[in-house]
Amino acid sequence: MGKGYILVRLFKFKNALPKTTGKLKITDSDSGNVIYESDDAFDISGRSTLIEVPTPDKSLSQKPYEEGVTPYGRYNIYISTNGYRDVEVDNVSVFDETTSIQNIEVEEENGLSKLGKSTEKIVLPPQQLVFNAPRDKQVGTMVTPFVLERPYIPEFIIVHLGPPSVPAENVTVGFIDYVKNVASSEIYPTWPEESLKANIYCQISFALNRIYTEWYRNKGYPFQITNSTAYDQYFVKGRNIFDNISKIVDEIFSEYIVTIGNKTPFFAQYCNGTTVTCAGLSQWGTVTLANNGMKALEIIRYYFGYDKDLVRATVIEGIPESYPGSPLRLNDENENVAVIQKQLNRISDNFPAIPKIPVTNGKFDKTTEDAVKTFQKIFNLTQDGIVGRATWYSISNIYVAVKRLAELEQEPEPEGPGGEGQYPGQILKYGSTGEKVREMQGYLAAISKEYNIPTIRPDGIFGNMTKEAVIAFQRLFNLVPDGLVGVETWNKIYEVYKGLEEENPEYPNPEFDGKYPGYLLRYGSTGEKVREMQTYLAAISQQYNIPTIRPDGIFGEATRNAVIQFQRLFGLAQDGIVGEMTWNKIYNVYTGLKKATLTEPPIYSPDYPGYVLKEYLTGEDVRWLQTYLQSISKFYKEIPSIEVDGVFGKRTKNAVMAFQRIFGLSEDGKVGLNTWEKLLEVYNSLSGDRNINMSDILYPYPGVDLELGDTNGYVNVLQQYINVIAKNNYKVNEVEVTGEFNDETYNAVKQLQRELGLKVTGIVDERTWNKTAELYETLYSGKRLRKSK
């Protein structure tokens, strides 16, 4: 016999508000014997003590299932708490040497029936490896869709609890929670860590492929994935998760598998590999390979091919600030520490076991370390007091959750900015912190209610959102749009703030009152308030680049997409949910449409203007083009400095051509879609942690030669290298990027080998690959200009 552990976490609102009182009883599912019972089972964070329970020996879960031998213990959990419905969860699985975490969200009792309190009962089915579910209908695609530029990690995923064509409940689940649930359902937590990682990478990639290719959306279904193993992955609503699996997912949830040369998340099929077989990964096979010393990526390549790689998504939906790129620890001092301090202080309002940090000045002191360790304990992270990637995103997720709950409960906005409007005597810029930053943000927050600039929250940290708001303000009031708050910008901000009219504009549409309904509007909501919100968005879409929708009173996927695009455009949290802040911004923009049309230029939008920008054109789009080029020219000296005047003259054309030359684009001096997107990519990276000089398709030699007839991702990358080199006046013909080493590619390789002074064979050996990649990198990054004609 072995022993495992159960941890019960009790919430009024999951991950946002703990329930700190309640009775807990745990019984053996088979015998009914009481294992644990307490009338006061939960601490101030809603956590039970760690409860030890007997389990079958670990060795039983290290080999495929034998009929009649279940390799884990099963227990029933009973929760009772005053004023809330009782909860019973049956068949919670517990493995030897592991901790099972059962999260329970209790629902308020709406009155007692004649029979007493009602009970919510959840009966969990067996682990997937026990009942050997079929996986015979799994079909996917690797076709890159038009709708998304590159994959991102969504905040939520919509799961259909049954086969696609069978009526069943659709549940919206946080993406990270979804992955933890699937991993805990599909595999055993006792497996080697590299085996667990290989399986979890497949599960993440499978789900992202469904989302990214819009597999079910394109078939007319209102969900993104099912929980049927015949079609998709095993998801069990309300089940427990395992502590070690939870920690792994927190570390790697933003990584997924790709075929080299293809940005689409790989459709990573898998099966148990014993009673059910498939062309993909064998779940039991990964255990053997990991025990033989293979790492997760090596296991993935063993099953799917050597042209598979792991990439990390750069965009995490719903997160206020991206991970800074390196861990934060004791004695660090920077604005990222201040972000964490402020978020932890807000979280501690709901989870008071987390000690308050008295001074949120960006200095990582002992008090901050203690707060981090307490947070890590409450949310089942490694308690090292260091804010690495997993802890950063966990803090961000919980912070967003508690803020949403506050919005639901109509948390009041902070008081006005205060201060007397006196310029601080120094330029405020990205990275600045302090009370003067907070004061300036307060002015901008008030201005955003009347003018079309992004809404920001005064937190005293000059981050990306504040920079975008400053630039939008500068554009609106004809100042230099550099994102710096010098004396001229400060005085104008204060002048506009002091001049705001106190009265709200009249409602332009008598059919609606413009008032926030008092509750969240989200995917699945219906009614007149949804139709009112849709009407506002439909009008806004005529002047701003958001999708046009039909006001039908049904909050579907099209409405959610329009809301997210609106939120992105106006600097709000991009969650697709219309809370009070989003509602008010929608209404303010709607009521200001007529005024904006007459007097205000459009605000910044990252979207391509819809036509080619070229010499002799004038206008706002040209001004934005010049703004991007001017910022980029500070890093790339080959690009001439230009004046931001909205006139596409000779100097602007020369700057465009220099940019195109550096980044391997067609050097025509015109800004079409490809040039515009590359401009945005480079511009957006200037303040981030991404290396703007690094291509995302630089790969080492694949380990085997590429030759005529090969078909894989490395050939795809090679073809992209060839085309960039060809555009830079090397005597090499461009080729079609297909991933197939055909005659066209063969001839181009021979031309390239002549240009590089290599032996001409048409075969890409290690020397040819490395020389080609080196030349590609120098051309892409601007380290070398194109070859003279």
Image: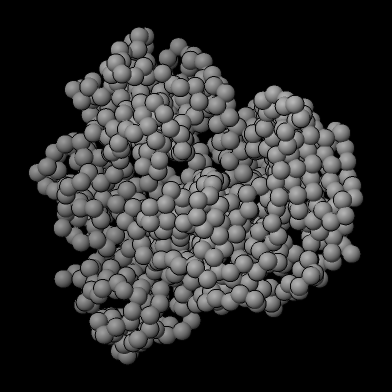
Nearest the camera: 523 or 415?
523
Instruction: Judge left or right: residue 617 versus residue 174.
Output: left
> Quarter of the image holding residue 291?
bottom right
Report if residue 287 is visible in the image: yes
| 627 up-or-down from 466: above or below | below
| 596 up-or-down from 699: above or below | above
Instruction: Judge left or right: residue 482 versus residue 656.
Output: right
Q: Position of residue 512 (x, y in %)?
A: 34, 19
Please report the residue visible at 58 percent of the width from the left and 40 percent of the height from the top. 396
Instruction: Judge left or right: residue 117 versus residue 514.
Output: right
Report if residue 297 is visible in the image: no
Instruction: Judge left or right: residue 275 versus residue 56.
Output: left
Nearest the camera: 452 or 188?
188
Q: Position of residue 522 (x, y in %)?
A: 46, 35
| 275 up-or-down from 24: above or below | below
Return the residue found at the far left: 616
Nearest the camera: 600 or 691?
600
Q: Position of residue 601 (x, y in %)?
A: 23, 29
Which colour assignment does the render follow?
A: one colour
Please report the residue visible at 81 percent of the width from the left and 67 percent of the height from the top. 58
